[in-house]
Amino acid sequence: MSLRNKSIILILLILLIDQVFKVWIKTSMVIGDEFHVFGNWFIIHFTENNGMAFGMEFWGKSGKLFLSLFRVVAIVAIGYYIFQLIKQKANTGLVLGISAILAGALGNLIDSAVYGVIFNDSFTEVARFFPADGGYASFLYGRVVDMLYFPIINTTYPQWFPWVGGHPFVFFRPVFNIADSAITTGVLYLLIFQRKVLFGKTV
């Protein structure tokens, strides 16, 4: 199989899993709903965010638009870079690692671009496709669907701990999705296994 086809298949596979999972969550649960998969350390918890990976946000609506447009530019740039790498017959691992990042960025862009248009809000009822009274947001202003929650450690800081003593401590607190996982996995793979290719043999 050609490197081009491997890249395309990986991107499509990640996108398919990401979007099927998100649509299932969106059309089956209300925000805040959850169920435990493995005890208290792997939970499907439905939430949405306006911002970056793992729920980070900035600058309100202006930041949301900027982020959506930035994703579009980044996706085009990454896609072009992958195309050039394939033409140069680059390392398979390098191409697939960057392809995973591209797939994750595409997955979250789809949420931001169209979910607000095709779904109603999920705060008080299960979302419906193309509701009669319209979606909950305009194009590029949709929210990203998150659901993977791994509170592996759920405890309290010791009282003697500075500033946060007695407060709850949860690791890992952020709720994320398959697209976030693809981006993180792709970046870590490149940094660990492809760093010489990316940064030169001096690294």
Image (tube, rainbow, N blue to C red):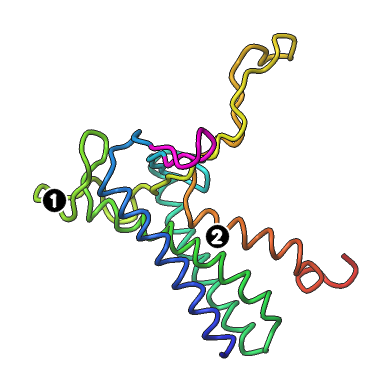
Tell me the CA gap for discs 2 and 1.
31 Å
Question: Of the residues shown, which amino acid type is indicated by label 1?
Answer: Pro
> Residue placed farthest to the right in the image?
202
Residue 93 coordinates in the image, percent (x, y): 68, 75
The N terminus - image quarter: bottom right
Q: Which residue is at a point 24% across and 42% down the rendered structure image?
A: 121
Mark 2 = which residue?
182
- The verdict on residue 165 being magenta is no
Residue 36 coordinates in the image, percent (x, y): 43, 37
Left or right: 29 in relation to 170: left
Left or right: 104 in relation to 130: right
Q: Which residue is at a point 70% across and 9% down the rendered structure image?
A: 159
Question: Of the residues shown, which amino acid type is indicated by label 2?
Answer: Ala
Q: Is residue 157 above or below residue 42?
A: above
Mark 1 = which residue?
131
Q: Which stretch did the figure color magenta?
A: 35-44
Residue 6 coordinates in the image, percent (x, y): 55, 82
Element type where label 1 sits in the image = loop
